[in-house]
Image (spheres, rainbow, N blue to C red):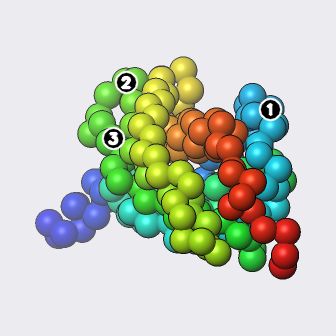
Amino acid sequence: MKNFRMLVVMGCAAILFGCASGAKMENMVYGNADGAPTTYDKALKKAINVGTVTGGEETNPLWTSEISDEAFYGAIRKTLELQGLLSDSGRYRLSVSLLNVDQPSFGFDMTVTTDVKYTLVDSRTGKTLLNKTIKAPHTATVGDAFVAIERLRLANEGSGKKNIGAFMKALSKLKINPRDVSLAR
């Protein structure tokens, strides 16, 4: 009987407070509508291959929302695709590591801060062209979502999107040395 009561309480809590869902890939994509830079070094056009994305966590529906490797990988790929930079066999290989996703345990306004390391390497020369760690906070308020678990997911997605946006801005400033670019295929 005691176990039954506990199950009823847990069931009611799940209905009242909702189950956690992970950050959605499509809500972390950074595109032109977000003010994404549209000019990049021409050597990067259709030349970036997304390699590994590590450090994310799968969401436990009974716990808290997280950013998975798969969702972040998809958001980065889609962002690069929208900018005309993505290639499955590109010369430049991008590796991404979610170093830290700082989340609140509770609160009305939920601020999530992502620390993400981006490394872009020329696969022909082995030269590292960009090695940057970006920290991006985002706050979701009660006005964004009444249910705390949903607010946390929105804060995760907003922080992920801002982080990818900051990476795209850093990428737009990258200048490739013409001597490093080969016209031979």
Query: Is any part of residue 168 visible from this angle?
Result: no
Q: Secondary structure at mark 2?
A: loop
Say how many tags the image has.
3
The N terminus is located in which quarter? bottom left
Q: Residue 149: horizontal and vertical position, in percent?
A: 43, 43
Q: Secondary structure at mark 1?
A: helix
Residue tagged 2:
108
Residue tagged 1:
33
Q: Residue 58: horizontal and vertical position, in percent?
A: 43, 65
Q: Tell whether label 1 touches label 2 (CB within 8 Å).
A: no
**Nearer the observer, disc 1 or disc 3?**
1
Residue 57 in which image quadrant: bottom left
Kindly give the residue lying farthest to the top in the view shown.
Answer: 143
For label 2, count other residues whose C-alpha is less than 10 Å away and answer few (under 14), some (14-19) or many (20+).
some
Nearest the eye: 142 or 131: 131
Residue 88 in which image quadrant: bottom right
Q: Amino acid at mark 3?
A: Gln
Q: Residue 54: horizontal and vertical position, in percent?
A: 44, 66
Disc marking residue 103: 3
Seen in the picture, residue 38 relative to 10 is either above or below; the reply is above
Q: Give the alpha-carbon distance from disc 2 to disc 1, as whole Å.
A: 29 Å
Say which residue appears at 32% left-offset and 28% top-offset.
107
Nearest the eye: 183 or 132: 183
Q: Secondary structure at mark 3?
A: loop
